[in-house]
Image (tube, rainbow, N blue to C red):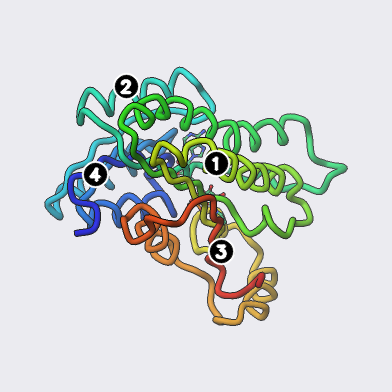
Amino acid sequence: MKLAGKIAIVTGAGRGIGRGVALALAAEGASVVVNYSRSAEAAEAVVNQITNMGGTAFAVQGDVASADDMNALAKITLEKYGKIDILVNNAGITRDKLMLRMTEEDWDAVLDTNLKGTFLAVKAVCPFLLKQRSGVIVNVGSVIGKVGGAGQVNYAASKSGLVGLTKSLAKELGGRNIRVNAVAPGFIESDMTDGLKEEHKEAILKQIPLGRLGVVEDVANVVVFLCSDAAAYIQGEVISIDGGLFM
Ligand code: NAP
């Protein structure tokens, strides 16, 4: 097992990619703190699934956009496990609208969750990683942060922001043996992409060289790799997982 004895926090881990990441980290031996915001039942189901496969996990409610909640998440993790090795900043939302229709509230909601949420989670965990002189942070960005998306100025800005945050943190924390990287998924089957119109999905599929949408395991496997010692010399990278859509 690549992550035996490691303690991992995954934000937004009750559903979708976060759930897949939590299960994959647990399958490699990590104890997982399953953060959720609203999906309490789903988060408990993830905990049960991990426990049933012989792993250790517990669920913690918390809004990533709240500094108090993220500080509490770090505190509870330390009380329970005594250390934090891995933070996966996965929680994210979309509020897609064309610019003229996008409200300030749409902008704030997406930036608060996707970008500020990552800042707050890192800020809460950082003092302990620095003290330990070890740790891994993986941020879940998006290919949209690299190439933009019509109707997604808020989402694209948040995910581009994550690239800058990732690279800056990688420079700041690398000297203390803390690795910081990001993944940039393309179109992955989840609740987030379920809402896409069929014709939109067909059009996207035609542009993907590997000829399929991604599944959560495609992302989870790369996150596990980045969290493991196999990625010991990877720092400040943003790895696309998009079937070749945006090369
Ligand atoms: P999803 O199925 O809609 O799940 C979103 C997750 O984020 C849920 O677990 C949700 O938890 C959590 N979340 C939302 N707001 C939160 C908050 N304020 N505090 C804590 N958790 C919060 O989406 P997904 O596809 O799994 O997306 C996961 C990440 O991958 C996001 O960052 C997304 O931008 C990124 N991504 C997805 C795709 C894709 O094609 N699916 C592509 C590129 C990047 P609750 O249900 O508890 O609120």
Judged by depth in the image, the label closer to the viewer, 2 or 1, is 1
Crowding at dot 4, Cα within 10 Å, few <14 / some 14-19 / many 20+, comes out as: many
Q: Which residue is mark 4?
A: 6
Residue placed at 67% from the left, 56% from the top? 144
Give the image location of residue 219, x and y in percent.
44, 61
Judged by depth in the image, the label closer to the viewer, 3 or 1, is 1
The residue lying toward the viewer, choosing from 140 and 195, is 140
Mark 4 and mark 2: span between their CA atoms? 17 Å
Contact, CB < 8 Å: mark 4 with mark 2? no
Q: Amino acid at mark 2?
A: Lys
Q: Which residue is mark 3?
A: 240
Q: Work out whether mark 4 precedes mark 2 in sequence or the reverse, and give the earlier one.
A: 4
**From the viewer's perspective, is 217 left or right of 120?**
left
Query: Tag 1's secondary structure?
Result: helix
Q: Work out whether mark 3 precedes mark 1 in sequence or the reverse, and give the earlier one.
A: 1
Asked if residue 194 can be seen in this view, the reply is no
Q: Which residue is mark 1?
A: 171
Q: Which residue is mark 2?
A: 75
Does 237 appear above or below 246? above
